[in-house]
Image (cartoon, rainbow, N blue to C red):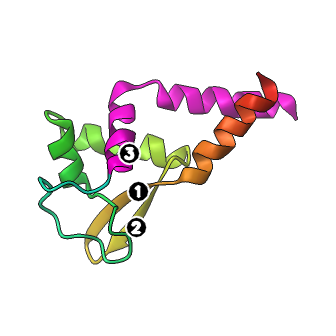
Amino acid sequence: MRQIDELAVAQAAKVLSDPIRLNILMLLKEGRQEIYQAPVCSAYAHAICPEDLKLGLGDISSSKLSYHLKELKDEGFIQECREGKRIYYLLKPDRFKSLIESLHRFY
């Protein structure tokens, strides 16, 4: 069991080791800003769409942003919600909590 948890922690650390992904997480933590242009998600007012994340990140292609969002989503750090044709992203705080608990348990 310990080996499985250690592998999960290592995979999470790998995903979090990329500066672009860390910046995405910081933007999602900060929530919506006045510079963002997309409509506010009615279900999650603090969720952010990729177009607005691109504004916050600066010079990043849509395909590169999509790749990083998928990595974060696959590892459970963010969730996606859809509203019409628009996709929004938000943090999943429970994932961070479980990662911290795993780190405390083993290290």
The residue beneath circle 3 is: 69
- Residue 58, position in %: x, y? 15, 35
SS state under label 2: strand
Q: Are marks 1 and 2 in contact (CB under 8 Å)?
A: yes
Picture residue at 53% right of the left edge, 26% below the top: 14
Residue type at numbered disc 1: Leu
Quadrant of the rendered image containing residue 107: top right
Q: Residues within 10 Å of mark 2 (few under 14, many from 20)?
A: some
Instruction: Report, in whole angstroms, how far the alpha carbon at label 1 lies from the one at label 2.
Output: 8 Å
Q: Picture quarter containing residue 36? A: bottom left
Residue hosting label 1 = 90
Find the magenta span and give its range: 1-30
Q: Which residue has dot 2 on it?
A: 81
Comparing labels 1 and 2, the label whose residue is closer to the camera: 1
Location of residue 24 in the rendering, given as x and y in whole percent from the top left corner = 34, 40
Q: Earlier in the sequence, mark 1 or mark 2?
A: 2
Say whether residue 7 is magenta: yes
Q: Position of residue 101 (x, y in %)?
A: 72, 38
Spatial distance from mark 3 to mark 1, Cα to Cα?
10 Å
Which of discs 3 and 1 lies nearer the camera? The answer is 1
**Front one among 53 and 105:** 105
Quadrant for the N terminus in the image: top right
Q: CA distance from mark 2 to mark 3?
A: 13 Å
